[in-house]
Image (cartoon, grey):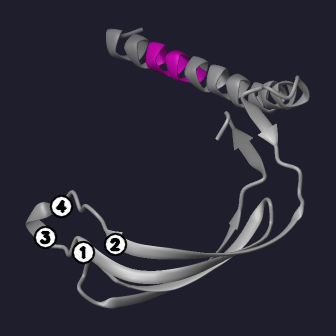
Amino acid sequence: MSTGNKHSSNKSDASRSVIKYALAAFLTLPALLNQALASESNSLVQIIDTQTKSQLWINPGMVSYHFQQDKNFNNRNWGAGLEYRFNTVASLTAGHFYNGDRDYSNYAGVYYQPIAIGSI
């Protein structure tokens, strides 16, 4: 057997080991998350109770920072949007703003946030 094939075989074995451990970690993660969720209420991760709400928020668009400074993007993104929270875990949002390409953009979306992390 040549030296080149031996190194290639070692790389394949190492790749298989990395994949095996990554797969094991990926398969274990849901169990760890479930255990964290099942523990006492001051745990790091919590499921939020769904409760009906009726809140209307105004979301102002103001500024941004573009890392590609050489592209001369607009960092003043003035605009406005509305967000309607119809329960504790979901809301609808829509708005209009002046974007980084110096043109107007519209957006609409849905927020779904059933999990709280920490005390926030």
Among the 4 quarters of the image, the one containing residue 47: top right
In the rendered structure, which disc, 1 or 4, sits on the residue that comes first in sequence? 4
Secondary element under disc 2, as helix, strand or loop, is strand
Specify whether residue 58 is painted magenta.
no
Amino acid under disc 1: Arg
In percent of width and height, residue 24 lies at 72, 23
- The answer to whether the residues at label 1 and label 4 have Cβ atoms under 8 Å apart is no
Alpha-carbon span between mark 2 and mark 1: 6 Å
The answer to whether residue 94 is left or right of residue 72 is right
Q: CA distance from mark 2 to mark 3?
A: 20 Å
Q: Residue 85: percent from the left, percent from the top? A: 73, 71
Q: For mark 3, give the secondary structure.
A: helix
Give the secondary structure at mark 4: loop
Q: Nearer the viewer, mark 1 or mark 4?
A: 1
**Residue at mark 2 to residue at mark 4: CA–CA distance:** 19 Å
Q: Which residue is mark 1?
A: 76
**Viewer-side label of 3, 1:** 1
Above or below 31: residue 6: above
Of the two numbered discs 3 and 1 on the same chain, state the one appearing first in sequence: 3
Going from N to C along the chain, the mark reached first, 2 or 3, is: 2
Chief secondary structure of the magenta span? helix
Residue 115 in picture, x, y percent from top left: 76, 46
Q: Which residue is mark 4?
A: 68
Which residue is found at the position 35% from the left and 91% from the top?
104
Give the crowd class for mark 2: few <14, some 14-19, many >=20 residues within 10 Å: few
Q: What span is in magenta?
A: 9-16
Label 3 is placed on what type of residue? Lys
**Mark in the foreground, 2 or 3:** 2
